[in-house]
Amino acid sequence: WRALWGRCLQAADEVRCFSDSTRAHLLRAYPALAAGRITLVPHRVDFAPARLPRIAARAPLVIGVMGEISPQKGAHIVQDLVARLDDANTDARVVVLGTLNVAHKSERLRVTGAYRREQLVELIEAHGINMFLFPSVWPETFSYVVAELIALGAPLVAFDLGAPAERLRHYPKARLCGEVSAEAALATLLDFHRQLALEEASAA
């Protein structure tokens, strides 16, 4: 299949990528492809919330996960993360704004089901979410979820993969996690939560 796509790409006048990360992956797979025919055209983001959500950094950690969370999108990371919170008997919890495609029952997990973008501010405040995790385990080419969370001004932790990480390096309320695991994600979330809580307390 790669050879077939290679001939298709060689015949194309232009190959569009949504991020530098995608472009790098494409050239690694097809090093003979003429770099001059590869253009960078990011997706247009039209989400503009009416207002930013009120986020209480000093409140107990409530981790938001947004979207349709399949295994590729990090469902098993979320499952393992909740299990670790259960084992630690902590007051931290996870709220999935959307769906989670693995079965997991816990008092520290809430799955809301489908939502509309216009509901995001109210959902974040209603559930007390003060930190988000983008748990995708593969290098995505763009991610509208990340774009929406940036537009909402939400604190965000993600793995250092693909186009989302590329953009989050320039977002001051983000932390990137180098190891793709629930253990590493939780450590990063807890550390970032402590930092933001201290900053909020010093600003009060």
Image (cartoon, rainbow, N blue to C red):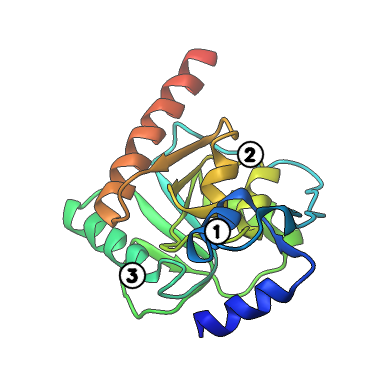
Label 3 sits on a secondary structure element that is: helix
In the rendered view, does 127 fall on the left or right side of 110? Answer: right
Q: Amino acid at mark 3?
A: His
Res. 38 in view: no
**168 shown above or below 202:** below
Q: Amino acid at mark 1?
A: Leu
**Residue at image mark 3:** 76
Q: Quadrant of residue 85?
A: bottom left
Q: Where does residue 160 sit, x and y in percent of width and height?
A: 43, 47
**Residue at image mark 2:** 54
Q: Quadrant of residue 79?
A: bottom left
Q: Residue at x 62, y 74 (%)?
A: 114
**Residue at image mark 1:** 27
Q: Mark 3 to mark 2: distance in Å?
A: 29 Å
Q: Mark 2 to mark 1: distance in Å?
A: 42 Å
Label 2 sits on a secondary structure element that is: loop
| Residue in front for this viewpoint, 171 or 60 | 171
Q: Nearer the viewer, mark 1 or mark 3?
A: 1
Label 1 sits on a secondary structure element that is: helix
Res. 69 in view: yes
In the rendered view, does 31 fall on the left or right side of 19? Answer: left
